[in-house]
Image: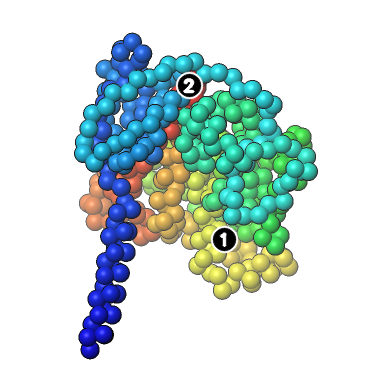
Amino acid sequence: MFMRMRKHWIVLLVMLALLVAGCSQAPKIVRVAGTIVNRHGRPVSNGALIIGSSMAETSKAGHFTISAPAGDNKAVLLVQGYRPQIVPLTLGEESQTVTITAELDKPSRRSGSTVDYLLLLDSLYKTDISNESGFTYLTGAEMKEAALVHAGIVDLETAVQYLSPAAMKRLCELLRIRHIVWIQKDLDKHLQIFSANSGRITSIPFEESRGVRKLAAPLASFSKGTRQFAEEKPRGIEANLAKEVRAYMEQLYDVTYTGRDIRRIKRIAEPVIAVSERPNLQFTFGILETSEYNAYALPGGYIYITRPLLEMLDSDDELAAVLAHESAHITHVHAIKSYERQVALTVAGIFLAVATGDAESSFDFVRIIGNIITEGYSKEQEYDADLTGLRYISRAGYDPEGMVSLLTKLQDLEYRLTGGRRGYSRTHPATQNRIKQVKAELSTIEYYQFLDQYLLSL
């Protein structure tokens, strides 16, 4: 009996020790207030201090407030027009005040040759890229320190998702890189390639065989200019759906495809699509002449907005938010993902019908389009379209607050039309939750907007 109790106590003590150890791993977050001054003691007002994922901009008096983990930190000080400064900080466990002296040194040109590609690829996946691939390259790990020292960028992989094309181009110049390459997780087997020469992003499909991603050939071809900016064509199920979209919508609505309003929509959408995951896809825009307040994103690049919703929008920023949200549904192929998930048991039959040209398959595709119109996308996909659209409009140069004002108007409209009893769709998240999520993301957007301006100042 005593031995059994002793064993229980030992187990409990071990578990308690593990629990304490686990708790001790989380550093205490402390509030740090301070002032940034130059060598002469004058305040620096156009700077920002970055610690981890937190950033604080300085006021006109050079003051800042930031929250950071206690202990040793490596802060990054960015002042527009000057090279980044790494600032070692040792923070106690209580709130404290610090003064940081900014070494305002002008940026210097990096020596050495220009590299063809900066590859921001997950090291867990194998590729066929080697020194014999026909181009020069560096990995994100190899360029991490240079990105911090010369551009003040802590996380390259995330930065390329948020920076504007102009800032990306300046980043390439600072790092002496011709192209930046990454793989967007939301678009299956497609490389995203930013070209410093053109200032554009393009998307190129790649093959995968036995767990090895075949990237060498498409990158070699792209570096020679033979595959750049080719128009993307929908494939598979998306291509078959796209064949049915226009006729289906024109059976339901009177649709306007030309005129001043369409030209405005195209003008506003162009920079949004250019920074998306599918910049090579040709989009079609239409205005639905109906009394509804709605917008639809359909496979193959079709975006429709109803006349009342278009007229309700007060600014280009709000219209850009609508177009960005809808284009995100298309660029992240939400319709195809939903369809494959919902009818997984019949996917093989659909592929067989497509392969054999079975006339009955068109009925299935028309029904799918109808489901998108009547039921919409899932809650998860709506949240994704909001956050992705927010990122798009920020990168494209529109005011991110346009997304907030758009959602606020939709919430007001919802209450006016329904008395607050229900939302637009059973599948749509509550509008107030969408607003909360977008507002929470604005701090990240502001972080990269400052970084954008900083890079352009160098």
Query: Disc 2 vs disc 1: which is toward the camera?
Result: 2
User: Closest to the observer: 370 or 269?
Assistant: 269
Of residues 327 and 309, the one drawn nearer to the viewer in this rendering: 327
Residue 125, x across and y down, in percent: 62, 55
10 Å crowding of disc 1: few (<14), some (14-19), many (20+): some
Q: Is residue 185 above or below residue 439?
A: below
**Quadrant in the picture for residue 144:** top right
Tell me if 370 is positioned left or right of 103 in this view: right
Front residue of this view, candidates 129 and 312: 129
Place residue 336 in its image quadrant.
bottom right
| The N terminus lies in quadrant | bottom left
Image x and y of residue 54, in percent: 35, 37
Q: List x then y, in percent, for residue 68.
A: 31, 39
Is residue 225 something one can see in this rendering?
A: yes
- The dot on residue 366 is 1
Q: Amino acid at mark 1?
A: Val
Q: Residue at x 36, y 13 (%)?
A: 39
Closer to the N terminus: mark 2 or mark 1? 2
Label at residue 83: 2
